[in-house]
């Protein structure tokens, strides 16, 4: 039943976040400083335009905030130019398409089913509707198929290629893609497609220096700020090219957005500052250790993981081919014992998206809550045991016992 007040509902959601194990790979718990900025009076201000070139008066302090956020993100990733106004990762991606391409241009991106994002060319997204898309995927081992990428590049001569993923658990070799593009350029009078990287999922790991960076390799890079980077919900675009940033700035405003969310931009700035600290680096290293321990516990329990493991913050558990439970059932049943995951298709999935064979599992949020390898190993055992019970359709009787196990585990880490 809908409650009387928004505050009551927010409190319910706060409690859910406190009493659930959050395993959604794209979620995190930002700091109180970030939250305070999001809820600050900066939300009152209109500031269409960019620092020093606004369409409204009274932007003196807003300009300071946006300029500082741009400086901080450039320092963090070691790049020259940034636009911190995109309201989301999808808006950032849309701005890149609008900045560099004409409608109908050819784009080569990673297939959604193989781990790519909707905005990398799915037919239900603006990207698949307004552009001519070709998609590369992963090989039989679940690793990016660089050979297929090269073949499609040579066959279709795209105007832009997109590298980056929403559910890919291996290190992405940005330089290898660049080498393929350079080889292509040699055969085409030095011309090659724009090279765009969407680093949304691994941005925090890149900031911490524990995943290769696309900066200095790709022409333009987009990201969200709310995943491993642990900031507010939002997007950003960075580049070393003055020519490209000019086009990007026009595409973001007035191209696809109006007034920037300066409260969110302040929160982004705070997250860039936080991501540059030694504490954040330690956090990012713990993410990798936790994801490895968690995935290995599943493998040791006889479960299949796409690509056989993880190098980053997440992995896709192939529940359907491991124990015959669909991703959808897994998502619904785990939710009932306070574990939040999302169903996810596996490469060449035999089930439709709304059922899916897999679930995507990520550790950034619980790592923020202080979870270590042993906690994830305990959780893997609870999940595997419970899913076997689900398979036997005996979960009704077991639910209370398993909920208690999960809640006890959450509480044990708090102590
Ligand atoms: C790789 C990638 N790019 C872009 C996005 C889109 O971000 P948003 O949900 O902020 O639009 C996502 C979101 O999950 C993503 O995984």
Image: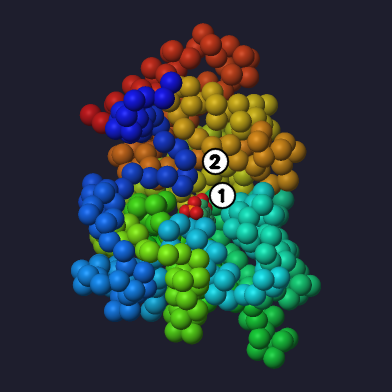
Disc 2 crowd rating (10 Å Cα; few below 14, some 14-19, many 20+) is many
Q: Residue furthest top?
A: 397
Q: Which residue is mark 1?
A: 167
Specify whether 411 is left or right of 146: left
Where 91 sits versus 251, above or below?
A: above
Q: Quadrant of residue 84?
A: bottom left
Q: Residue placed at 66% from the left, 33% from the top?
A: 355
Assess whether mark 1 and mark 2 are in contact (beta carbons under 8 angstroms).
yes
Where residue 167 appears, as percent x and y from the top left, is: 56, 49
Q: Is residue 44 above or below residue 391?
A: below
Mark 1 element type: loop
From what the image shows, is residue 291 above or below residue 135? Answer: above
Q: Position of residue 99 (x, y in %)?
A: 54, 75
Q: Which residue is mark 2?
A: 360
- The residue located at (32%, 75%) in the rendering is 54
The residue at the point 27 percent across, 61 percent down is 45
CB of mark 2 near ligand 1 (< 8 Å): no
172 or 334: nearer the eye?
A: 334
Q: Is residue 243 above or below residue 23?
A: below
Q: Earlier in the sequence, mark 2 or mark 1?
A: 1
Residue 233 showing in the rendered view: yes
Q: Residue at x 66, y 52 (%)?
A: 124
- Answer with the quarter of the image where residue 110 lies: bottom right
Q: How many marks?
A: 2
In this view, the residue in front, 240 or 212, is 240
Question: Foreground residue, 94 or 277?
Answer: 94
User: Marks 2/1: CA distance?
Assistant: 7 Å
For residue 349, side relative to residue 179 (left or right): right
């Amino acid at each position: 039943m809908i409650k009387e007040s928004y505050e009551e509902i927010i409190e319910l959601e706060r409690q859910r976040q406190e009493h659930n194990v959050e395993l959604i790979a794209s979620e995190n718990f930002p700091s109180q400083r970030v939250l305070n900025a999001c809820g600050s009076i900066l939300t009152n201000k209109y500031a269409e335009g960019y620092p020093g070139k606004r369409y409204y008066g009274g932007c003196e302090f807003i300009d300071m905030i946006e300029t500082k956020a741009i400086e901080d993100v450039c320092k963090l990733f070691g790049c020259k130019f940034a636009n911190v106004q995109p309201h989301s990762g999808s808006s950032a991606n849309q701005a890149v398409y609008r900045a560099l391409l004409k409608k109908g241009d050819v784009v080569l991106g990673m297939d959604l089913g193989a781990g790519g994002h909707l905005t990398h060319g799915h037919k239900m997204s603006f990207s698949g509707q307004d552009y001519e898309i070709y998609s590369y995927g992963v090989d039989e081992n679940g690793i990016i198929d660089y050979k297929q990428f090269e073949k499609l590049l040579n066959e279709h001569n795209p105007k832009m290629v997109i590298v980056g993923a929403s559910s890919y658990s291996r290190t992405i070799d940005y330089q290898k893609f660049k080498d393929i593009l350079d080889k292509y350029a040699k055969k085409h009078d030095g011309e090659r497609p724009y090279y765009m990287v969407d680093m949304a999922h691994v941005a925090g790991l890149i900031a911490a220096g524990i995943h290769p960076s696309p900066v200095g390799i790709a022409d333009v890079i987009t990201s969200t700020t709310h995943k491993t980077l642990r900031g507010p919900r939002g997007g950003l675009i960075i580049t070393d090219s003055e020519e490209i940033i000019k086009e990007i700035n026009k595409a973001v405003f007035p191209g696809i957005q109006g007034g920037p969310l300066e409260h969110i931009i302040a929160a982004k700035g705070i997250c860039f500052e936080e991501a540059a600290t030694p504490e954040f680096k330690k956090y990012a290293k713990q993410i990798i250790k936790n994801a490895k321990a968690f995935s290995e516990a599943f493998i040791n329990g006889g479960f299949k993981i796409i690509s056989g493991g993880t190098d980053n913050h997440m992995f896709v558990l192939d529940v359907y081919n491991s124990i015959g439970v669909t991703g959808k059932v897994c998502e619904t049943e785990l939710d009932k014992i306070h574990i939040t995951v999302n169903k996810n298709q596996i490469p060449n999935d035999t089930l439709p998206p709304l059922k899916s064979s897999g679930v995507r599992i990520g550790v950034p949020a619980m790592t923020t809550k202080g979870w270590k390898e042993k906690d994830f190993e305990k959780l893997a055992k609870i999940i595997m045991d419970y899913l076997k019970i689900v398979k036997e359709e005996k979960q009704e009787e077991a639910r209370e016992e398993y909920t208690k196990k999960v809640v006890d585990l959450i509480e044990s880490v708090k102590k």
